[in-house]
Amino acid sequence: MFRTKPGRRRGPAVAILAAASLMLTLGGCGVDAVTPGEARGKAADSDDKGGAGTSGGVDCGKAKCIALTFDAGPGRDTPRLLDVLKEKKVPATFFLLGRKHVDRYPEVVKRIADEGHEVANHTWTHRILTDLEADQVRDELSRTQEAIQRITGRKPTLMRPPQGRTDDTVSEVSRELGLAQILWSVTAKDYDTTDSALIHQRTVDGAEGDGIILLHDIYDGTVPAVPGIIDELKRRGFTFVTVPQLLAPGKAEPGAVYRP
């Protein structure tokens, strides 16, 4: 879906087209997505139970779970975010960008992994993968895989396509590289505001059980909003988990698309 050739998006109409395409993508146009509940149900019905992400004994089939995820880091504010997550005892999933992020902050990448968060792939340069040919998609993902492995000793098993855009080519390359594709159910659109109160409100208003929250730890208003988001969602009875924990006892299958 949304398959175009490199270099076709230009000029003022680009933003409108991109926004419309993103809305269609997240609305499920042409995307055969699996919900967290379906992933758990499939495992429950199968003899092959993955068991991944069950640490801490959280059963998201019973608890009101939600996954907090951060894209396009690490950045200068990520250590402060990690301090907050440690203090609040909240695990998160970090979809890391390779160029100028993983390669610039290797010690932060290692800390993310060492503190028990899920380290995932958000491409090397944030190019829109549906604009690319298969070898270019492979390069965007594999370079980040290798960079993260050098730092943490482990290749990610999850990726998030920029702007949530995927198609058959992206899915096939992801399958080759052992990567499941993770979309989201709520975003604060923190890329267009520095207002932490607004980021907080947008996030908590959209929160739901089995949800996946998309935030960015590279924007000024985001990290200051996180403590309040965590406190409010805990007050509402949510349990924070990583994406693998949200799917457990199912396992994220390479190439598949997951979205609440």
Image: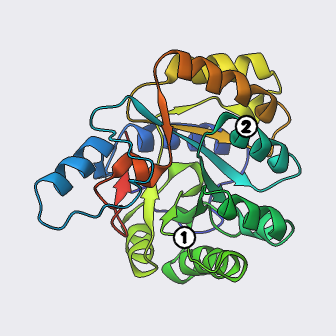
Mark yes or no: residue 100 visible.
no
Q: What element carries label 1?
A: loop
- Residue under pointer 2: 87
Q: In this view, does 102 lie above or below 1?
A: below
Give x and y (percent) for residue 158.
Answer: 49, 63
Identified by mark 2, the residue type is: Glu
Identified by mark 1, the residue type is: Pro
Q: In this view, does 202 lie above or below 131?
A: above
Image-based side of 166 in relation to 135, left or right: left
Q: Nearer the viewer, mark 2 or mark 1?
A: 2
Looking at the rendered structure, which numbered label has been put on residue 156? 1
The residue positioned 60% from the left and 60% from the top of the image is 128
Q: Is mark 2 on a helix, strand or loop?
A: helix
Q: Gap in Å between the C-alphas at discs 2 and 1?
A: 25 Å
The residue positioned 41% from the left and 56% from the top of the image is 53
Give x and y (percent) for residue 230.
Answer: 63, 27
Location of the C terminus by quadrant is top left
Give the class, few, some or many, for how many residues have Cα within 10 Å of label 2's Cα (few <14, many ≥20).
Answer: few
Q: In which quarter of the image is residue 215?
A: top right
Give x and y (percent) for residue 170.
Answer: 45, 68
Foreground: 87 or 60? 87
Q: Earlier in the sequence, mark 2 or mark 1?
A: 2
Looking at the rendered structure, which numbered label has been put on residue 141? none
The residue positioned 63% from the left and 39% from the top of the image is 89
Taking the view exactly as shown, the residue that stands out farthest to the front is 56
Location of the N terminus by quadrant is bottom left
Foreground: 24 or 231? 231
